[in-house]
Amino acid sequence: MLTIRGDIHRFLQFAAVGASNTIVHLLGMLLLVEVVGLVPVAANIPAFLAANVWSFIANSVLTFRAAVVWTKYPRFLSLSLVAMAVSTGIVQAFQSLGWHYVLGVLASTGASLVINFLLVRWAVFGTHSGSRNSF
């Protein structure tokens, strides 16, 4: 059973992994666009996937103290895509209301961080949060 303090610590760790995930995504984009010569839209897919794999590994080991179990990755990826869809929907809703898109991005970042944390904690790491196995 998790405590409030443990949940807050895990959430902050999840947010830190998310920040590092953003850096991996950006570096991947820069490498693929500037060095390899891909167009940004084409570069975004492998950069996103590399960042998502990094996020899965880091969240397994650091946030949830669990083994990296690759059979769990498809669920993690699916939840990441759901979070992206929710985020996109929030930005669209803000724009539909005539509000500045940056407000939508800020709102979607906060909402998707919380939603993704809760979903990943429950659906991916729920039975292993607290175990520390080798990978």
Image (cartoon, rainbow, N blue to C red):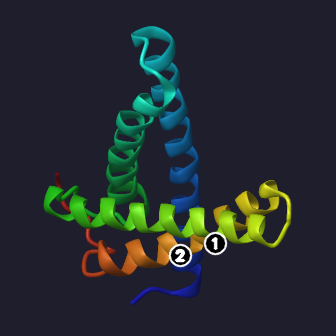
Q: Can residue 72 be seen at all in this image of the molecule?
A: yes
Is mark 1 in CB contact (under 8 Å) with mark 2? yes
Location of residue 63 by image quarter: bottom left
Q: Residues within 10 Å of mark 1 (few under 14, many from 20)?
A: some
Q: At numbered mark 1, what does the secondary structure look like: helix, strand or loop?
A: helix
Q: At numbered mark 2, what does the secondary structure look like: helix, strand or loop?
A: helix
Location of residue 99 by image quarter: bottom right
Looking at the image, which residue is at 54% across and 60% down? Answer: 13
Looking at the image, which residue is at 53% across and 78% down? Answer: 7
69 left or right of 83 in image: left
Q: Residues within 10 Å of mark 2 (few under 14, many from 20)?
A: some
Q: CA distance from mark 1 to mark 2?
A: 6 Å
Looking at the image, which residue is at 59% across and 80% down? Answer: 5
10 left or right of 53 in image: right
Per the rendering, the mark at residue 21 is none
Provide the residue designation for mark 1: 111
The N terminus - image quarter? bottom left
97 left or right of 6 in image: right
Q: Residue furthest right?
A: 99
Location of residue 71 by image quarter: bottom left
Q: Position of residue 43 (x, y in %)?
A: 42, 29
